[in-house]
Image: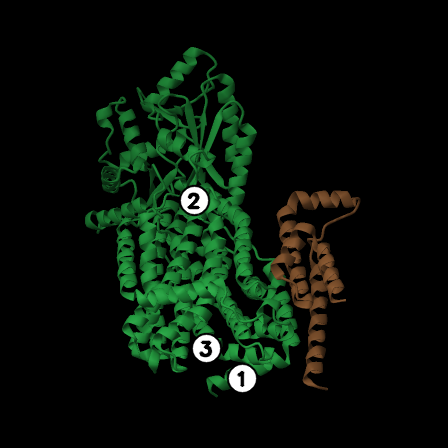
Chain colours: A brown, B green
Amino acid sequence: MNIEQKDKILSSMVMMLSFGLLFFIFSASDNILNLEGKTIKDLIEFIVNRYLDLVLIIYVFICFQVAGYVELKFKQDFITSSLLCILLTPFSLLFIIQNEDDENN
Amino acid sequence: MNIRKISNALFNFDVHYPRTIIASAIFITLIFGWKAFDLRMDASMRSGLPRDHKIVRSMEKVDSLFSGSDILIVAVESDSLFDFNTLQKLSFFQDSLESIELISKVTSIFNQKYISANKNGFEIEPLLESIPNDSSGIANLHERLIQSGMVGNLISEDFKTLCFVGQINSSFEYDEFEFRKNIYELVDHFNDSESFYVSSIPITRATVIDYMQRDMRVFTPIALGLCLFLLMLSFKSWTGVFLPFFVVGFSIIWTFGVMGWIDLPLTFIGTLIPVMLVAIANNYGIHIISHYFEYSRSDLVASRGQILKKTIRKVGIPILLAGLTTMVSFLCLLSHSLPRAREMGVLVSFGILVAFILSIIFIPSVLVIVPRPQHLSNKYNLTFIDSFLIKMSKFFIRHSKIILTTLSVIAIWLMLGIKYLKVDTNPDHYFPKSSDLRIANTKISKAFGGSTQMNILVEGDIYDPNVLKNIEMLILHIKKRHEIVTKSYSIVDVIKKMHSGFNGGDIAMEIIPEDRELIHQYMFMYSIASEEDEFDVILDDIEDPAYTQILLRLGEAKTFAISEIVEDTEQFIKANFYDESPMELTGGATLMGVVNHMVIRGQFNSLMVSVFIIFILMAFVFRSFNGGLFATMPMAVSVIMMFGLMGYMNITLNINTSLLTCILVGVGIDYTVHFLWHLRDHIKSGSSIEEAITKTFRISGKGILFNGLSVVLGFSALMFSVFVPVRIFGILIMGSISFCLFGSLAILPALTSLTKPKFLYK
C-alpha cells in the first residue's frame, strides 16, 4: 500500500467518523423542529420569516463554493462564476461549462 | 533539529497526508462545534467581577443586610395625574410592581408616611389615606405632599409626574435581560393615556448589550462579506478567498468549542473574540496564499509541491514569530484585574494558536490537492497591484526623509490628542436622543434627580448621636463638593423629621437629638405606627441597628464623576472619621465607576508589559537591540496614536474600547515581523536594501496590504449603525489596522532605507 492509498483510507475513515458524529449530534439535539401537521408551505414561511438573513448567507456561501469548484475543476474565472452563480443560481454555471466543452470539441 | 529540517518534515507531512489532514480538521471542528452552539450567554455582572474587590464584598454584605442597593425608577406623566381613575390605576401598578420577584420594596406617594405634630408629640399616618375624588381632596393631598417634602422626590414640582422607586433586592444574582423584560411587560400593560418612563442602571446595561448584539448580528455578516469581496478582487481565486476564511472560521469554532466543553459562559467581553480573530487570524493564511501565488506566477515550470515547499520555507518562521508575539501580547492580559479579560486573553491566544497551526498544516494540504488557479498560468506580467506596490516602495525609499518628517508631524499631532482622551463614560450617550431609554433617563433626571444610586455603608452604634452627626457631615460634604449628587436619604433625615414633629413641627428643631435614648424612643414609636419593613432599605435592625446605608442619588451615571466621588469621599472618611465607625462606599454605581477605571489601568499595564516582552523577543530573534526597536516601535507608536485619535474623535476609554487596542498590538507586530523578516531574507540573498524593499513590498507587502484593506473595508460597514458603541467598534478596528499598515508599509521602508540597520545584514 503506497502513501496515497494510505492517506485515502485514513481520510475516508475520519470522514465516516465525522458523518457518524454529525448524525449523533443531530439525533441528540432537542432543537429539532416539530413538523407534525405542517405543510411545506408552512415550513418555508417559517424559515423565511425567522431566518431570512441566515438563508441568504447560506445561499451566497454555497454559490461561492460551487463557483470555486467550477474554477478549479473547469478552469473558469472565479469572479465571473461567483457573480453568475449568485445572480442566476448555481444552475447557470452549467451553461458556461457546456459552452466550454463545445468550444473544446 | 534545525528550522530547515522542521519545515521539510512539515512539508512532507502536508504532501503525504493531505486528505487525512483535511478530514481531521473537519472532524475536530465538528467535535468543538458540537459544544460551541450550546454556549450559554451570561449577561450577569457577578460572574465577571473581581470577587476579592472590597466593593464587591461590601455589596454582598449590603445584599445580606438590607433589601438591596440598586434602584429602578418608573415615572408616570399625565395632565390628569390626580384624577381618581388615574390614581387608582397607578395604585394597582404599585401592587403589580411589588409583585415582581426582584423588587423587594416600592416607594411612592401611595405608601409613604406623613409625620405631623400633635399634642402627644407626633403622629405617623399614611400620606395618601384614600384616593381623593374631589377638588378639595386633591388640594389637601397637594398640601400634604409639599409639607412632607415629597415634591422633587416622588412627585414633580408641576404635579404632573410621579415616580415609583423600586428597590432591587440583589446586586448581582439576576438576569438583567429577564428583569428588563418583566418591567417593560408590566409597563406596557398599564400604558394607556399616561406616559411611562423607566430608568435603572441594570436596564441601561442590558439595553446596551442588547443593541450591541443586535447590531453586531446585522453588521458582522456584512463586514465579513466585504472582507471576502476585497480578497476576491485581490486573489481572484477560491483558494485565496476561502482558505484563510476557513482557517479563521475554524479557529472561532474551536475557541468557542473549548468554552463550551469547559462550560465557560459567553459574556459581553467574549463577543469581542470573533472580531479579534477575524482581524488578526486571517493574516497567516493570507501570507501563505500570497507567497504561494507569487512563486507560482514567477516559476511556471515548478510543480505544486516545489512551490509549496518554497512557500513553507519562506513564510513558516515569520508566521510562527507573528503568531508567537501576538499570543504573548494577549497572554499579558493574564495580569488584568477583571477575570473575564483574563479569560479573553487566554481564549484569543488559543484561537491564534489554532489559526497558526491550521495555516501551516491545513492550507498547504488543500493547496497540494487542488490545481493552481488558471490566472497564475498566464505569462508573468506585473499586475496593477504589483506596479502600485513597486512604485510605493520606490516613493518611500526616494523620499524617506520627507515621509518620516511628515509622518512624525502627523504622529505627534495625533499623540497630542491624548490630552482630550476621556475616561468618563455615560452609557446614556450611546443612544440616539430620540430613543425611549434616553428620553426616560433625561425626564427622570430632570424631575427626580436621576436614577443612579450610590450607597455608603456605615457600621457602628447607629443611634449614637455622634455616629448620626458623622453621617450628616459626610452627606453635607459630598453634596457640597459634587454637583452630580442631587439627593440623599439616610436615617438622619427620618430622625430629624421626627424630632421636629415631636417639637410641634418647629423647623429649627430639625436637628439630631443629643440623647441616644430619645432617638431610640422615636424609632420605637415609628416602628409601632408603620409597617415592619419600613426601614429595611436603610437599617439592618430597627431595635438595635449595627449597620445603616446612606443613599445618594446621582443626576447622571458618569463613571469618571463617580470615581471622583469615591476617591474624595474615601479621603474625607479617612481624614475625619479615622477612629470612628467604619464607612465604606458600595453599590452598583460605585462598582461601575471603580471597576471601569481598574480595567483601564489593567489594560494599560498589560499593554506595556506586552510591548516590553515583544521587544525582548524580537531583539532576541534579530539578535540586535535595534532589531527589537524596529519591530516594536511602529506598533507602540500606533497604540499611542490610536489613543490620540480617540481623544480627537471624542471616543471615551472604557472596558471595551481599551480591550480593542489588543487588536492593534496583535496586527501591528504581525505586519512588522513579516516585513522585517522578508527584508532581511532578500538582503541575505544578495539584494541591495532598495531592491530588497521593493521585493518585500511585491511579495510580503501584497499580503499585508490585502489583509489590512480587507479588514478595513469589511469593518467600515459598522459605521452605518445608529448605535454609537458599534460605530466606535468600527472606527477602532479601521483605525488600528490603518495605523499598522502605515507603520509597516510607510515608516519601516523609509526608516530602514535611511538608516540601513546592521541587524538586517547579519
* Res B674 seen here: no
**Residue at (47% x, 63% y) in the render:** B385
Residue B518 percent across, percent down from the top left: 27, 34
First in sequence: mark 3 vs mark 1: 1
Dot 2: element: helix
Choose top left, top right, bottom left or bottom right for residue B693. Answer: bottom left
Q: Residue furthest left?
A: B575
| Position above or below: B311 against B217 | below
| Position above or below: B95 against B735 | above
**Residue at (41% x, 11% y) in the render:** B136
Residue at mark 3: chain: B
- Name the quadrant of the C terminus of chain B: bottom left
Q: Nearer the viewer, mark 1 or mark 2?
A: 1
> Which of B555 and B415 lies nearest the eye of the viewer?
B415
| Position above or below: B707 against A55 | below
Dot 1: element: helix
Task: Please state which amino acid type lies under the numbered disc 1.
Answer: Asn
Query: What residue is shown with label 2?
Result: B724
Residue A89 percent across, percent down from the top left: 70, 52
Q: Neighbour class for label 2 at 10 Å: few (<14), some, many (≥20)?
A: many
Which mark identifies residue A35?
Answer: none
Residue at mark 2: chain: B
Q: Neighbour class for label 1 at 10 Å: few (<14), some, many (≥20)?
A: some
Dot 3: element: helix
Task: Please state which amino acid type lies under the numbered disc 2.
Answer: Val
> Which of B672 and B754 lies nearest the eye of the viewer?
B754
Q: Are marks 1 and 2 on the same chain?
A: yes
Q: Residue furthest bottom?
A: B1
Q: Determine whether, in the image, residue B188 is placed left or right of residue B79.
A: right
Query: What residue is shown with label 1?
Result: B8
